[in-house]
């Protein structure tokens, strides 16, 4: 949609070929249906939030920056607001309003939209893309073709990886697509006990073969298979290359306190509950559902009386609260992934125009490329910026 708008504003006659029954199905579900369409951070943070190939986006981000995206939508009549983490949403909290704004502009520019239409293949002649071939083998001729088909995450939105097939036809290499911004699976039966438990203001650290590869502070959620939530999804962007290693997640349930401060706090609580059992003495410190899990991982008997607890056992309890261990066995699949990591190799695409270096008249934009970023509106910013460049360059 963004590529079509800027190609049409540039005087081109444009046709969008959309295999779904409507435009913007993936956009509709982003940000839990609220559409976090960009991030109002400074440009340096924009680049630092891109995980794969940030340097490739230099021209794209400076040509159509996050501020320009906000101005663009305002110009289309969409009011927006900035929330925690500089995330930008429509004031209405409805992703449909973002889609409607784009559709209005497409209509104004007289862009032809062909819904429920698949593309069979690219029409290539002498290393030039001259259009597309439809399933009935008819050709739709064009001076330029922009492939903006997305990745393969959330297949129910129509994402099926056909953009990779088209790129391969034109001689491009595909970096193996993998699910990213996706929950973790843990090898731990305690996940069943903790299912549905949401934690705020906790810290997580992930280690691969004993080396720290990620840490963050914020919110997370236990599920029947493992963990999810903002700090977990963000962490998934960093662990793909370590999936063959021993991956451990350590959860600090009290990051605001040092071990000494936490030990002092535990001692104060224990003085109040000297004659109680251990499992009935931690309610002021931990969520009830967490207590049996913490005690089990600390190898402590919950039925032991507080006044019978040794100093070493208390220290073990404190250490476990500060570093609750879980083994990561893998990531969830594309059905639950917000984005796709991997895609068309950016080495074969001109970063200043988004045109293929291998095939004339062929352009790429968005998630079909080997570009991915953290949560917070950064992946949509990649889509807007690369779509803009492809649109004005084609």
Image (spheres, grey):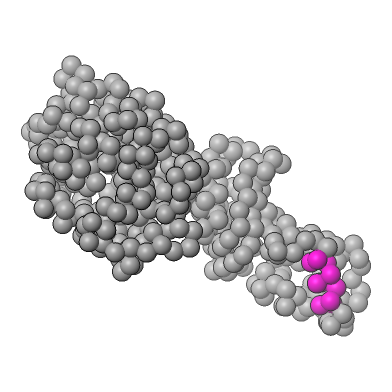
Q: Is residue 292 magenta?
A: no
Q: Residue at x 9, y 34 (%)?
A: 140
The residue under the point 72% across, 78% down is 283
Report the magenta residues as a range.
Answer: 261-270
Q: Is residue 380 visible?
A: no
Q: Nearer the viewer, residue 67 or 111?
A: 67
Q: Main secondary structure of the magenta part?
A: helix
Can residue 87 be seen?
Answer: yes
Which of the two residues, 59 or 369, is positioned nearer the viewer here? Answer: 59
In the picture provided, is 379 more to the left or to the right than 225?
Answer: left
Residue at image location 8% in from the left, 48% down from the top: 110
Answer above or below: position of 281 versus 246.
below
Residue 138 locus on image (x, y percent): 7, 33
Q: Position of residue 371 (x, y in %)?
A: 41, 38
**Residue 311 location in percent, x, y?**
91, 66
Q: Please name the residue shown 91% across and 77% down the image.
A: 307
Q: Is residue 170 left or right of residue 10?
A: right
In front of the other: 141 or 390: 390
Vertical order, 248 against 163 (above or below)? below
């Amino acid at each position: 949609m963004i590529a079509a708008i800027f190609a049409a504003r540039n005087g081109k006659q444009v046709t969008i070929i959309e295999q779904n029954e409507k435009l913007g199905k993936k956009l509709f579900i982003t940000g839990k249906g609220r559409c976090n369409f960009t991030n109002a951070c400074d440009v340096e943070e924009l680049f630092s939030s891109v995980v794969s190939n940030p340097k490739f986006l230099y021209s794209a981000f400076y040509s159509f920056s996050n501020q320009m995206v906000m101005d663009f939508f305002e110009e289309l009549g969409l009011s927006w607001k900035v929330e925690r983490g500089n995330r930008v949403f429509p004031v209405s909290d409805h992703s449909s309003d973002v889609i409607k704004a784009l559709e209005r502009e497409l209509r104004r520019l007289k862009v032809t939209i062909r819904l429920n239409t698949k593309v069979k293949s690219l029409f290539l002649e002498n290393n030039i893309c001259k259009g597309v071939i439809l399933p009935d083998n008819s050709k739709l001729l064009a001076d330029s073709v922009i492939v903006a088909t997305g990745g393969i995450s959330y297949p129910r939105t129509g994402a099926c990886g056909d953009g990779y097939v088209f790129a391969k036809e034109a001689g491009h290499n595909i970096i193996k697509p993998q699910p990213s911004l996706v929950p973790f699976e843990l090898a731990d039966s305690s996940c069943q006990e903790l299912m549905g438990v949401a934690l705020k203001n906790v810290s997580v650290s992930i280690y691969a073969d004993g080396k720290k590869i990620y840490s963050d502070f914020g919110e997370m959620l236990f599920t029947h298979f493992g963990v999810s939530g903002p700090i977990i999804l963000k962490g998934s962007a960093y662990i793909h290359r370590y999936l063959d290693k021993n991956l451990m997640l350590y959860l600090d349930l009290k990051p605001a306190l040092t071990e000494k401060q936490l030990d002092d706090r535990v001692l104060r609580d224990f003085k109040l509950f000297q004659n109680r059992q251990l499992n009935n003495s931690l309610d002021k410190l931990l969520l009830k559902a967490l207590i049996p899990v913490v005690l089990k991982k600390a190898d402590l008997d919950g039925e032991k009386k507080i006044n019978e607890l040794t100093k070493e056992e208390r220290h073990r309890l404190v250490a476990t609260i500060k570093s609750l261990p879980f083994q990561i066995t893998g990531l969830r699949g594309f059905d639950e992934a917000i984005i796709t990591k991997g895609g068309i190799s950016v080495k074969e695409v001109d970063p200043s125009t988004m045109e293929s270096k291998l095939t004339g008249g062929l352009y790429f934009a968005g998630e079909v490329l080997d570009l991915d970023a953290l949560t917070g509106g950064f992946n949509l910013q990649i889509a807007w910026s690369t779509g803009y460049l492809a649109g004005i360059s084609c």
